[in-house]
Image (tube, rainbow, N blue to C red):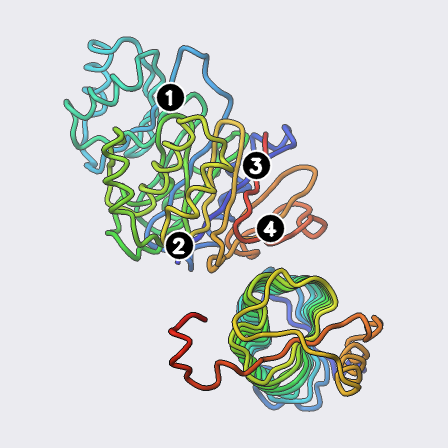
Amino acid sequence: MAPAAQRVIFDLKRQSVRELNQFLHGELDGVREVLVENPDGAHSLAVGLNAAVRVDIGGHAGYYAAGMNKTATVVVHGNAGPGVAENMMSGRVEVSGFASGGAGASAHGGLLIIRGDAGLRCGISLKGADIVVGGEVGNFSAFMAQAGRIVICGDAGDGLGDSLYEAVIYVRGAVRSLGADARIEPMSERDHGAVRELLAAAGLSHPSSEFKRIASSRSLYHWNADARQSY
Amino acid sequence: MCGIVGLLLKDASLRPRLGELMVPMLIGMTERGPDSSGMAVFADAVAGDRRKLSLYCAHPGFDWRQLEGAWIAQLGAAQFELNANHCIVTTAADVTRAREWIAAQYPPVHVLSAGRSIDLYKDVGLPAEVAERYGFSHLAGTHLVGHTRMATESAVTTENAHPYTAGEDWCLVHNGSLANPGSLRRKLEKLGERFESDCDTEAACRYLHWRLSTGESLEQAIEHAFSDFDGFFTFLMGTRDKLALVRDPFACKPAVVAETDEYVAIASEFRSLAHLPGVKHAMVFEPKPAQVYSWSV
């Protein structure tokens, strides 16, 4: 924990989300840590950050927590609503409970860690960020994910990796169904290294040998008139 | 977008405080539904030969005392409890006959609900205004279903506000939209269901009620709804002794549940649950798509 002079507390029972975000967007003058008390499911907490600051949200967050994050570390000590860390550019976002739908949607960079389960459409349209989910992910996760890596320690729902581009998914549990064009591929040494690296970053310790790799078979990359739309 | 809230009190000592616990839940969903709101409250059932009807009339000058006199003369003894432009009538009259009599004699009066346990209130305005107008914070009971509406497919009127009811002691609120309410309605009208609004949710409410009336379980009825409804929905439903919740298979519309030994609380978002006693230690979860959750009193 940073010395008191470098730490600021926002109590959302008395202060507004706008005050919090405007403070985080301003000159931080040496503030290294911000604690947010009584978030009570408020929307848009700690969004659009662009500074080397750590924000601890002491409870459940609503929609879009830590959206568009750059550089900062945001930790939700509870559950996160839809769209946590959507369009993150860099930095680190952690959720200690579950995350609702669309976690990490279209995130370009950085690391999103969800210690519980993730809802539907986790990592939809991912563009380069890494996501580690300690539990399971819901249906249609990694839909049209273009770049980045997703490590799922539990099971995955229906349609995993539908219409994947070059993002890679590692799943430890059962996959209820794969989406169009997604396929299970052999784990290379590089894949084992990637799983080990991401699990270590999240402080998790499953053997990489328990994961399987899912990636695009690239059959949708080019128009195939013979397929007669039967994807 | 709309907001749904539900609360079922397992701890009987909390039941006098049902309304007080619920009002912040409803107000918490104002941003999701500022147009109109409503609530169905289930309390101890009246005797088996009696029924309660919740009536509503949009005209502020409506003469309820005249209606009361005519009712007693035509349909027999009844107690009238007036609350703003709503009125709860407790009666031994046959519900179908009473509905027909009101429709024929008093066209501006709507029967919002009927049953042994249910009272229903709905009106246009911000949730806080509607809650204040009808004194929601003083209501007691075992469970309730509430809604805040942001109209997307039909006008902002009291009739189009939720909850919807059909038959007796059955109500439904909806977050989402259906693309085929017209075809559902035509099918149900042929089977004898009478519609009172042009809101898509009424079609869903009457469809499920019709399925239940054929002897299907709620699970079976909803299984049919998955194939017959074209659209998005999170439905929260209430019966005399139950709350039930379901999200469509794509689960576009949110819901979160907090359960303790004292209560089960349901809302579109956690911010409507944050004030509840002991919620920090509650089991909080998101209902999975296409799965029916139900809780009994």
Q: Are marks 1 and 2 in contact (CB under 8 Å)?
A: no
Instruction: Please provide percent x and percent y for residue B157.
Output: 25, 46
For residue B102, side relative to residue A105 (left or right): left
Q: What whole-number distance in Å separates the C-alpha atoms at marks 3 and 2?
A: 23 Å
Mark closer to the chain start, 3 or 1? 3
Do callouts 3 and 4 point to residues on the same chain?
yes
Depth check: give the residue in front, A226 or A16: A226
Q: What whole-number distance in Å separates the C-alpha atoms at marks 2 and 4?
A: 26 Å
The chain under label 1 reads: B
Instruction: Please provide percent x and percent y for residue A50.
Output: 60, 88
Q: Secondary structure at mark 1?
A: strand
Q: Secondary structure at mark 3?
A: strand
| Residue B52's disc number | 1
| Residue B8's disc number | 3
Q: Secondary structure at mark 4?
A: loop
Mark closer to the chain start, 2 or 4? 2
Residue at 64%, 89% (x, y): give it: A51
Q: Is residue B56 above or below residue A177?
A: above
Mark closer to the chain start, 1 or 4? 1
Query: Disc 2 designates what residue?
Result: B176
Closest to the camera, between mark 3 and mark 4, is 3
User: Dot 2, how many residues are within 10 Å of its Cα: few (below 14), some (14-19), or many (20+)?
Assistant: many
